[in-house]
Structure formats: C-alpha cells, structure tokens
Amino acid sequence: MIGTSIWNYIFIRTCIFGLQLVAPFSILYSLANSLVHLPLGLPRALEVWLALETAFYLIIYLLRKGYLQTAATHPVSASRASRRRLFWRCHSNIPDEIHYLRKWFLDAPEAEIKRENVKEFFRWAFLSTGHLDPGHEEELEEYAINMEKLLGRKFEPGRGSAKCMRLTLDQVDMTHRSLTWYFCIFIVDIIASSYLQLVGFSFCRISYPRFLQIFPFRPLNLFKSRRSPARSVTYWHRPHTSKTRLPVLFIHGIGVGLYPYTNFLAELSAQDGDKDLVDGQTGIIAIELMSISSHLTVDTLLKNDICEEIELILEAYNWGKFVLVSHSYGSVIATHLLRAPRIAPRIGPMLFIDPITFLLHLPDVAYNFLYRKPKRANEYQLSYFGAKDIGIAHTLFRRFFWTDNILWKEDIDGYDVTVVLSGRDLITDTKAVARYLTGMDDWPSETRGGDAIWNSDTLYIMWFDFLDHGQVFDKRRTRKMLVDVIRSYSTQGQ
C-alpha cells in the first residue's frame, strides 16, 4: 500500500487521471478520425491502439457492466433460531454502538436513522433480502428493540433520509479499465511468474478451453504441461518432500495476484539451513484467485465450490495436515476451509495476515473498502485500483455474503494461530479486532519500536503500529517475522 505523503498523493492522482483519460480520448479521437481527415494524425500503430481501446470500452466493458449488475443469488436463509443466535453474537461484540450505527448508515445524522431504516438494515443483514414480508416483522422488531437498549434511546417511528449499506443489494460500483491498464497487468503477471519459476515454483494451469476465460491472457496457460486437478483454480506449487515438517497452503488477497507476495514466497521457500538437505524441502501451494486479481474472468466461486476445488488440489499431492496462511481477502477462503468437513481436519497451525473476517459484522471493512470517499493517497489507491476494479467490485457486491464469511475466535479454538495486525490499516478496525481477540480493553497498552506482541497458549498476536494494510510484505524485517512463524509451525511435524 502506498504512503500518505503529498508526493504519494500527486503520484496516485496523476496515475488515476491518466488511466481515466484513455477511454474518452480514444473514443473522441477514433470518432473524429472516422468522420473527418485530421490535419495532425497520429502514428498508424497508435491509431489502431486507440481504435481497439474504443471497441474494448463500447463492446466489452458496457456489455459486461450490464451483466454484472444482475441481482445476487443469496444463500438459503438460516432458521429464525439460528438468525437470533447470530444477532446476539454480533450484538454482544459491538465496541462502539454509535459508530456501528452511523457507519452502516454512511455517516447519516442519528436523527435521520429511524425505526424503519433500522429494520431495513436488519432485513438485509440477517434475512438477506430487501423485500417487505409481514411474517418477518416480529423478528425485525425484536432486533430494533435490542438495538435501542444498546443505544440507550428509542428510535423515532417512520423512515428518515438515511441510507444504509446493503452490499449484495446495492448497485455494483465499478469503473472502466483500459487495454493500457490490462497490458500493465499482463507485464506484472509475467514478472511475477518469471520470478516464482526462478525460485523453484511450478505453475499448474487450467484446461485449454478455459484459457479464454481470463483476460489479459496468460501465456503460461498455453505453454505449461502441468494441469491443475481443479476445474478453474490455478496455483503455484513447490513439491513437499519433508517427512517431518508440514507443507504450507497460501491464499492471497485482493490486488494484482501473487506479485506483491513474490519476495515473501521466495524467502519462505529458501533453504532452511541443513534441514532441506537432510529431510527434504517444505512444500508450498500458492492459490491464485483471478477474479480478485485485476483480470477479467468468470464470477468468483462460491464457498462450496472453492472448497471443493482446493480439496482436489490437496488430494492430488496427498497432503495430510498443513499450515494455512492467508492474507486479507484470503482470510475469507480460510474461513470457508475451516468449516469444510473434509478439509478442516487437515488444517494445522494458521497464520492470518491483515484478516478481514474477524468482527466482520462491524461496518469498517465494507465502508472503508467500498463506500468511503477517498481523501488520502492510500485511500485513492485502494478505491480506484482495488474496490472499483470490475472483478473485485462484482465479487464484493454480488458474491460476498458476510454471514458465511465472518470468523469468531471460538472458531479457532484448539488451533495454534498467529494473527498479524497493522495499526494504520485503512480497511479494518485493527484495534477493535485486537481487543476482541485478546480480551484487553486497552490494546496496545505498550509498544516496542511501534510493535507489540501478545500470546496465550495457542493464540499469538503480532502488532505493527506504523504499518498500513499489506505493508508487512514490503519490508524484509517484517517478512522475516512471518517466515519465522510459518517455519516454526511447519516444524511442529505431522
């Protein structure tokens, strides 16, 4: 993640402005050039490129944009008893009730958040619908009354002007990406792929017919002979030959695929002294999630489908127990794996880096990632290059169901777990997460050089006070700390 200096701000705004200018300039120039003979024409190659940019916008983007606004297919609603249990679990873990209410309602004045507004929010949050149903009125009234008790005041009757966030019902907020941008992604993909091959990873492709389902096209899907046992999930593999250590499954976050993690994966796969020579090497599988990697591709797999695909990959290498490592959005997939009956027994120690799934009922992740109006450089980077990417926006607005994705600390009981949090995280309320996991109301009470640690018998918290979301991968010192944790977990053996 970029910094917040004035130079970072100028740089990121300039990049965004330049990329946003490509489509309108291409359309205007191509239109004008087709109608009249321009006195100062551009080189032929550039004119062809602008024509392709125009066609890409008018044919690919506009058609796809319409399709991606299709209503979400929500999971089957749980029973009322299950919904009530979830409500109380969430209700008991709201650190700031005013912040909770106002952020879910996009900072609306409290006076405009009236009883029907609150019911509308709970209707989406716990019933996964926006439709009025008299049969749900008693349940919604119960939730509203308990929210009043938490706030210590009554809601005014009726409906105010406040609008709440309802991710899977709201319009998918996306922006056009030019061929120029996708060419940059193509280059980034080539650099990451070349480096991963250099440090000992092998690419496992999807079937040839599915090659055309990913744009920009990936040459590795044509030239590599090793095929993924999964239908649509590609990954990078380092063989596991150790008899005493656990292999590692890594799941990345939203962005540009595995490129930000290449140094981390290289350092993780580096020889661990004489152990690799005597005992063999620690295996690594790095899953690729192309729908959140700035590519045009098919819809994000739902939880059962992604678990099934990952299970096929694990079975192909006969992996038993493994160390599970996830970053940011990857913690969503990790949560699904923890609840998959055929995979959960194989999961050993876990490392969550910048997780978004703890306290997901709070508004911070949704608001900060999708709805906040950016002001600082890192917020512009997150909004334009992250949240408003076509595939990422569709994933979060149409395929992200918070009740399936939330992770409670009880879910990780019995596992050895390390959670890495950053004090300047612009997505997650990391202090609330740390207080929830540690049970300490004054976290972090003391830091050493900006860092803090906390541990119980099985839970370990690593806190980096001066880092933003994802910056733990940018520094050799902090990457080494992650690698040390993983190697320690791996050597616990099978």
Image (cartoon, rainbow, N blue to C red):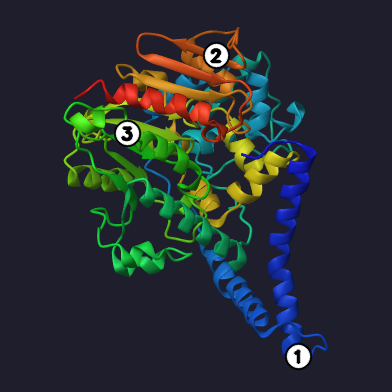
Residue behind mark 2: 452
Q: Secondary structure at mark 3?
A: loop
CA separation, marks 1 and 2? Answer: 65 Å
Which mark, residue 271?
3
x and y percent of residue 280 in the render?
21, 34
x and y percent of residue 256 in the render?
51, 50
Residue in the foreground of this view, choosing between 260 and 59: 260
Residue in the foreground of this view, choosing between 462 and 110: 462
Residue behind mark 1: 35
Residue in the foreground of this view, choosing between 407 and 130: 407
| Mark 2 or 3, closer to the camera | 3
**CB of mark 3 within 8 Å of CB of mark 1?**
no
Q: Quadrant of the N terminus?
A: top right
Image point 78% across, 47% down: which residue?
10
Judge whether 215 appears above or below 125 on screen: below
Q: Secondary structure at mark 2?
A: strand
Judge whether 22 appears above or below 461 on screen: below
x and y percent of residue 377 in the render?
72, 41
Asked if residue 387 lies left or right of residue 295, the reply is: right
